[in-house]
Image: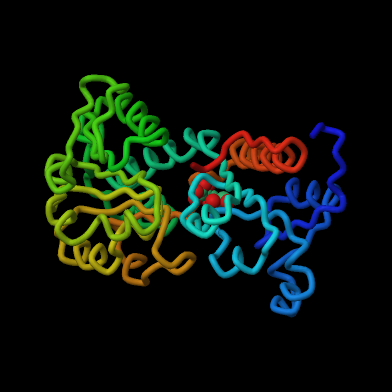
Amino acid sequence: MTDTVATDSIDLLMVGPMPASITAHAERHYRLHRWWELKDQAAFLQTQGKSVQGIVTSGRHGASRELIESLPNLKAIISQGVGVDTINLDAAKARNIVVTNTPNVLNACVADTALALILNVSRRFCEADRFVRDGRWPNASFPLTIKPSGKRCGIVGLGNIGLQVAKRAEAFDMSIAYYNRRPRNDVPDHYRYYDDLISLAQDSDFLVIVVPGGGQTRHLINEAVLNALGANGYLINVARGSVVDEPALVQALQDGRIAGAGLDVFEHEPQVPPALLEMDQVVVFPHLASGTQETRQAMADLTLSNLEGWFKRRQVLTPVT
Ligand code: 8YV
């Protein structure tokens, strides 16, 4: 197949709203169906499900087993985002359906966000901003905070994003330790490996979660890990809300069993447990880690390269394996 292959008779199903550049391209060069706008999805599957060859989706919208199984001629699931926990990979694999994501292009922004959360929970910068805006400064001094520089950074999942977190934390003179299924032999020797999450939590001031979401990591951060992190420890999550047992986190924060939490992700987004919003030791972001113009553009470009690569050349840049 060559680049001149016409794609305008190929049916694509877009699961949820996507960035304008992706939607415009898909609309111009394919027959695009917007799943979330269909009035009768079951009728669509019955009459046109057989024609759909590609799904275009994102980490947020995913692709369920039910949807994949309703599309008998589906060949490729092209997703924007590195996380694929919302895509039923087993259903895709069973039918040799190619799945692509957008790794690496977002590493810097996600790691930047982890560091922002570390600085914000320890120095209480968000709270300090509220203190000034609320007009409290003339009548009170802002309390002393905790110095993040030189502290111990424990990274749960030293993958590509984890390495970028480590690099940034080292610039703040932090020591680096990590928990993985296996030690990595391609990282600096002074990064200490732990095969036991409880011990890593015990030895960390900031426990930063960067593991993928999904069944294997569900509630990896539970009450025991939080207790091990302890009253001076902070939990930072830029991965997936499902990795943390959220009620256990709320309870640990309420009891003062951990010092605070910086969270970009939640178990039931966009719902955030109301109790977290009442705590000044918690900083909450609206799942914004990859959300810069530059990174989202790079993610959209990679998504389109995978889409074009598959339907024109049967080659994709970043398959999920
Ligand atoms: C995005 C993300 O919010 O890449 C991921 O896995 O969580 C984020 O970058 C989202 O998936 C964009 O589609």
Q: How many marks?
A: 0
How far across and how far down the image is residue 192, in percent?
19, 29
Decide which of 221, 69 is in the foreground and name it. 69
Residue found at x 70% / y 67%: 35
Decide which of 46, 229 is in the foreground and name it. 46
Residue 198, can we see it?
yes
In the rendered view, would you say 296 is above or below 230? above
For residue 76, side relative to residue 102 (left or right) = right
Quadrant of the image for the N terminus?
Answer: top right
In the rendered view, would you say 277 is above or below 199? below
For residue 203, side relative to residue 33 (left or right) = left
Decide which of 128, 190 is in the foreground and name it. 190
Residue found at x 17% / y 40%: 195
Residue found at x 67% / y 35%: 315
How far across and how far down the image is residue 162, in percent?
36, 35
Residue 144 in which image quadrant: top left
How far across and how far down the image is residue 316, in percent?
64, 37
How far across and how far down the image is residue 56, in percent?
67, 54
Residue found at x 45% / y 69%: 271
Residue 288, can we see it?
no
